[in-house]
């Protein structure tokens, strides 16, 4: 029997012992009156005599993360959702029955304690327990020595353990939550309406990507997990919702890397009577605000670089960027070659936030052609640390032009391009009803959070990233 299995068997016996004594190892209705952080913030500056003069009793609940017993007394620490705090247990105070209950407690268990506050000889703010209950008895021990979970793949597979034993992981996801809340506040202040569009679609569209396919039994039809919400959001603008945004999951049947996960979170927003230059300014305002709210400054540290989100950001056309970073003459390159050189030799050099504009129209099937040069689209991409973070453009609202581009995509699809778009007749009909002059943009939330949390892999900012099955891996 392995050492872990031995511990599990010992804990299961404790569960049986508790039940045999009429004590539930998994009770309900244990209510804390305070959190650890509330107590620490309110009383951290109080001296011992001041604490001992308090008549208030405090009830806390949390997971035991440290336990040191001295026979008839013990110190332990519990962690709740806000912080961790020290607890003092003494037989003389608790009494025989509750102290006997304490003897069944292991690191990893959840407990409820009530008591008064005092300072130890080392001046640590501590709760002296006058009442103790087991809230949940755990049967599987946490990784050894509390910080024992280091294998990166095990951490992703067992995120529930990762969050317990690696505090910086929890911090990253708290930051992610702040980012999402700040996004909603930002767009709400600017009169945008948050909406939800279908995740299962009869026709995949809105991006060049291979979709996942599923089947609806009752309707007896194939459906596609959405690769982007774009075409549905623009239908809403047609319907008179002139400013809309959505934060949601997209699904693309592509490879997995430090920057790619098959399901990921995107922000997409559309504004009538705006152009892509308006959206570049809006994006600068947004990123400046997000960086300040999550990090306290527009400057952040990411891997080996200091990145400054302070606006304005440099703006280069794709041709200007190729000329600047490769010294090649972009006017002598074919459209396909220009794009390839940009992706292979230029993107990695765009460390500070940089807007790249004037993408070839052939590579922008949903973007409006530039009036002066129809070979390029009124489009931009934002790059930070060599990665595409945002993509925006003036929306193509000419139904005839859009229909021709859809036809070209279908032809590419028939020739084997699995990422080409399908022909969406209903969307063409929506454009015929009339889409006002509109600009739209998508921002990759996962990549943005990677930057704001100094995370090197997209898996570090997705709670449950897609992994190869254990059986397939073995």
Image (cartoon, grey):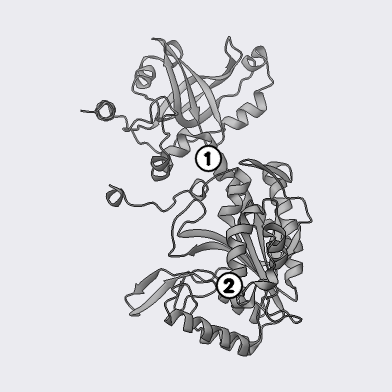
Residue 190, percent across and down? 74, 64
Residue 321 seen:
yes
Q: Nearest the camera: 107 or 204?
A: 204
The answer to whether residue 453 is above or below residue 339 is above
Labels in figure, total: 2
Residue 388, percent across and down? 61, 59
Residue plotted at (56% across, 76% down): 232
Residue 279 placement, left or right of 265: right
Q: Nearer the viewer, mark 1 or mark 2?
A: 2
Q: Nearest the camera: 152 or 10?
A: 152
**Residue 15, quarter of the rendered image:** top left
Residue 56 placement, left or right of 264: right
Report how far apart the C-alphas of labels 1 and 2 lie in the structure.
43 Å
Q: Residues within 10 Å of mark 1 (few under 14, many from 20)?
A: some
Residue 188 seen:
no
Tell me the number on the disc at residue 197: none
In this view, the residue farthest toward the right is 312
Residue 454, percent across and down? 60, 43
The secondary element bearing badge 1 is classed as helix
Residue 376, percent across and down? 68, 76
Q: Nearest the camera: 241 or 471?
A: 471
Q: Which residue is mark 1?
A: 170
Residue 206 placement, left or right of 142: right
State the quadrant of the N terminus: top left
Q: Nearest the camera: 264 or 95?
A: 264
The answer to whether residue 78 is above or below residue 358 is above
Tell me the number on the disc at residue 336: 2
Q: Residues within 10 Å of mark 2 (few under 14, many from 20)?
A: few
**Residue 323, quarter of the rendered image:** bottom right
The secondary element bearing badge 2 is classed as helix
Q: Earlier in the sequence, mark 1 or mark 2?
A: 1
The answer to whether residue 191 is above or below residue 424 is above
């Amino acid at each position: 029997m392995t050492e872990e299995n031995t511990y599990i068997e010992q804990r299961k016996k404790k569960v049986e012992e508790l039940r045999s004594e009429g004590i539930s190892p998994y009770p309900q209705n244990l209510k804390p009156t305070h959190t650890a952080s509330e107590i620490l913030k309110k009383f951290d500056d109080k001296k011992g005599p001041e604490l001992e003069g308090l008549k208030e009793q405090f009830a806390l609940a949390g997971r035991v993360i440290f336990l040191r017993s001295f026979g008839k007394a013990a110190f332990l620490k519990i962690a709740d959702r806000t912080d961790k705090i020290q607890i003092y247990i003494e037989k003389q105070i608790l009494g025989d029955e509750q102290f006997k209950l304490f003897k069944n407690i292991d690191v990893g268990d959840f407990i409820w304690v009530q008591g008064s506050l005092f300072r130890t000889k080392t001046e640590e703010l501590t709760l002296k327990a006058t009442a103790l209950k087991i809230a949940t008895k755990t049967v599987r021990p946490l990784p050894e020595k509390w910080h024992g979970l280091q294998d990166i793949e095990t951490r992703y597979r067992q995120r529930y353990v990762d969050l317990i034993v690696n505090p910086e992981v929890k911090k990253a996801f708290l930051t992610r939550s702040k980012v999402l809340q700040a996004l909603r506040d930002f767009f709400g202040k600017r009169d945008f309406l948050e909406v939800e569009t279908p995740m299962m679609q009869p026709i995949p569209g809105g991006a060049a990507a291979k979709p996942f396919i599923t089947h609806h039994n009752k309707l007896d039809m194939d459906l596609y997990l959405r690769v982007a919400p774009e075409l549905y959001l623009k239908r809403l603008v047609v319907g008179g919702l002139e400013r809309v945004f959505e934060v949601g999951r997209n699904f693309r049947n592509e490879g997995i890397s430090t920057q790619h996960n098959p399901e990921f979170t995107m922000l997409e927003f559309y504004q009538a009577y705006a152009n892509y230059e308006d959206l570049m300014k809006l994006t600068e305002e947004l990123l400046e605000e997000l960086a300040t709210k999550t990090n306290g400054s527009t400057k952040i540290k990411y891997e080996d670089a200091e990145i400054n989100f302070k606006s304005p950001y440099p703006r280069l056309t794709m041709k200007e960027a190729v000329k600047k970073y490769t010294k090649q003459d972009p006017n002598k390159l074919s459209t396909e070659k220009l794009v390839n050189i940009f992706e292979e030799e230029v993107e990695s050099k765009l460390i500070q936030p940089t807007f790249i504009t004037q993408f070839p129209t052939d590579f922008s099937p949903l973007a409006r052609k530039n009036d002066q040069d129809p070979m390029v689209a009124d489009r931009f991409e934002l790059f930070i640390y060599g990665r595409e973070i945002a993509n925006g453009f003036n929306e193509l609202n000419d139904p005839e032009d859009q229909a021709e581009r859809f036809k070209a995509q279908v032809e590419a699809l028939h020739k084997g391009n699995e990422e080409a778009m399908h022909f969406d007749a209903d969307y063409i009909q929506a454009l015929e009803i009339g889409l006002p002059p509109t600009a739209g943009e998508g921002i990759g939330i996962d990549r943005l959070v990677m930057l704001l949390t100094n995370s090197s892999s997209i898996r570090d900012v997705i709670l449950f990233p897609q992994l190869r099955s254990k059986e397939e891996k073995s």
